[in-house]
Amino acid sequence: ATPTALMVGTGRSAKMGILIKNGEVLEAVNDVTTVVFDKTGTITMGKPEVTDIVGNQAQVLSLAASLEANSEHPLASAILAQAKAKGIVPAPVADFQAIEGQGVQANVDGQLAFVGNDKLLVDYSIDEALKKRAVNLQLAAKTVVFVGRGHQVIGLIAIQDAPKPTSKEAIAALKARGLKTVMLTGDNKRVAVAIAEQVGIDAVIADVLPADKADHVAELQKTGKVAFVGDGINDAPALTVADVGIAMGSGTDIAIESGGIVLVKNDLRDVDRALAISQKTFKRIK
Ligand code: ADP
Ligand code: MG
């Protein structure tokens, strides 16, 4: 490719809010066969909201808010916003601990308490009706966190993070080019599959620990060139390992630094637009 052609390509995309670091990145886009997406904040809006509370609402919300007041996770923000709306003030806790990919725990009034997913349930008893309720909420694309203390689950909170309005169209465009689309997420499998169905994603890899995201990308690279699209701190290693790392403009600084492409408008349709520009640039010169 001539330097002029590359400049035209990267210049044209920059005008559209697609920042491509250099000519090599633009060329690599043309060889991509699989596009892997982070879920939260990439496919979805990243604005989780509490939709259901099962159990004694005031007790469940109050305990959860007291624990989550110490967390910076998006799920914590959703729970704290709901508590605030209900006039609940978080209480201080002792020995707070965040457990990666699972939830949070702390000492509350002398008892160990937790908010988190089913991986944290092993030391707690939970009744079957509540378990069943959780499954049904997950099948409806809602993330469930259980709330417990003193070895007893006292309830659950369901949290919804809807897909961005353009995600479905963006995925359809990539599939029309014959590309494989994959969702990679730390969230529960049932929730991930439900969201994938809403936006038309082919494959789902769920329950992934943050540290393992890059390994999954490397595994997918055995079958072809992979682009990874993400926004979070957790996504930085995957963005670096991928043949093309695509960061959301709304993402964390570390994600943006790790990406070869930045989507300023946070619109997933720009992945397809970048592909179109790359194709045009490299077809013209070959
Ligand atoms: P992702 O960003 O892909 O959702 P995370 O690793 O951040 O992945 O979280 C995975 C899962 O761990 C969440 O879906 C949730 O079930 C649980 N979790 C993590 N942090 C918290 C928290 N602060 N409160 C409740 N649950 C949490
Ligand atoms: Mg994310």
Image (tube, rainbow, N blue to C red):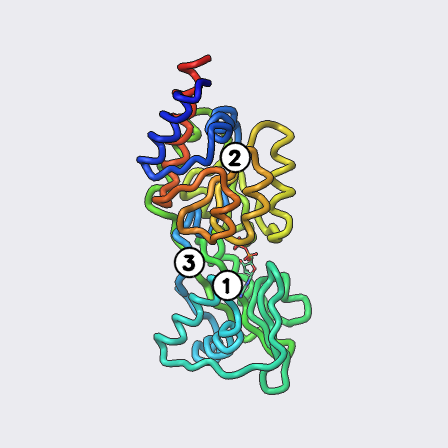
Q: Give the label on residue 160, or none.
A: 3
Q: Position of residue 154 (x, y in %)?
A: 54, 75
Dot 1: what SS?
loop
Q: Is residue 88 visible?
A: yes
Dot 2: what SS?
strand
Residue corresponding to mark 1: 73
Does label 1 point to a residue whose CB lies under 8 Å from ligand 1?
Answer: yes
The residues bearing labels 1 and 3 have C-alpha atoms spaced at a distance of 14 Å
Q: As drawn, which residue projects farthest toward the top?
A: 286
Does label 2 point to a residue whose CB lies under 8 Å from ligand 2?
Answer: no
Q: As drawn, which residue projects farthest toward the front?
A: 3
User: Disc 1 residue type?
Assistant: His
Q: Residue at x 53, y 75 (%)?
A: 67
Residue corresponding to mark 2: 244
Q: Quadrant of ligand 1?
A: bottom right
User: Disc 3 residue type?
Assistant: Gln
The residues bearing labels 3 and 2 have C-alpha atoms spaced at a distance of 30 Å
User: Disc 2 residue type?
Assistant: Val
